[in-house]
Image (spheres, rainbow, N blue to C red):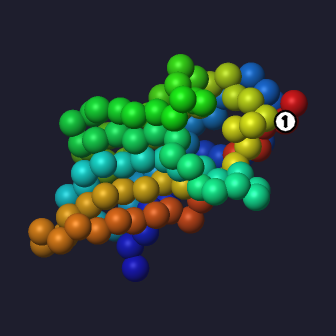
């Protein structure tokens, strides 16, 4: 079964940077919007950033100015550059993709990658 595969998580000190990547393990049709979400322990999953196929972006207020989402449409890959990381950014980060297969909308999630920011 095709899924999204994330990479790039890890442990970093506050003020540091990480870059997350996400790509499908196989063909998932025509990808529209892609995005990153995160879930901290005891909290609900929340939107971090999204990007459309045309490159329009949207960010959570808490990460605006520190995180940058980008994508390579040729590789069906989405990235999240995270700078000036804070301990409150600690969470499991999930990749998401809205696609269309034979005209039918589909939605995919990755398995998540842990980001831990130490103070």
| Residue found at the very far right of the displayed protein | 119
**Is 59 situated above or below 73?**
above
**Is 4 situated above or below 83?**
below
Question: Is 40 left or right of 65, judged from the image as shown?
Answer: right
Q: Residue at x 60, y 30 (%)?
A: 62
Please say whether residue 113 is visible from this viewpoint.
no
**Is 5 situated above or below 2?**
above
- Dividing the picture into quarters, in which one does residue 83 lie? top right
Question: Is 89 left or right of 26, judged from the image as shown?
Answer: right
| Residue found at the very far bottom of the displayed protein | 1
Question: Is 76 left or right of 48, judged from the image as shown?
Answer: left
- Image quadrant for the N terminus? bottom left
Q: Residue at x 63, y 34 (%)?
A: 18
- In x, y percent, where is residue 106? 29, 68
Regarding mark 1 in the picture, which secondary structure is present there?
A: strand
- Dividing the picture into quarters, in which one does residue 108 lie? bottom left
Residue position for label 1? 118
Q: Nearer the viewer, residue 108 or 2?
A: 108
**Is 15 situated above or below 51?**
above
């Amino acid at each position: 079964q095709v899924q999204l595969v994330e990479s790039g998580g890890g442990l970093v000190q506050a003020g540091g940077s990480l870059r997350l990547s996400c790509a499908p393990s196989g063909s998932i049709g025509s990808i529209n919007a892609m995005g990153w979400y995160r879930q901290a322990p005891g909290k609900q999953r929340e939107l971090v950033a999204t990007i459309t196929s045309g490159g329009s972006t949207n960010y959570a207020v808490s990460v605006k100015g520190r995180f940058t989402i980008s994508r390579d449409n040729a590789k069906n890959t989405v990235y999240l550059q995270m700078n000036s990381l804070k301990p409150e950014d600690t969470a499991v980060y999930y990749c998401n993709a809205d696609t269309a297969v034979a005209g039918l909308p589909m939605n995919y999630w990755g398995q998540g990658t842990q980001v831990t920011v130490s103070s």
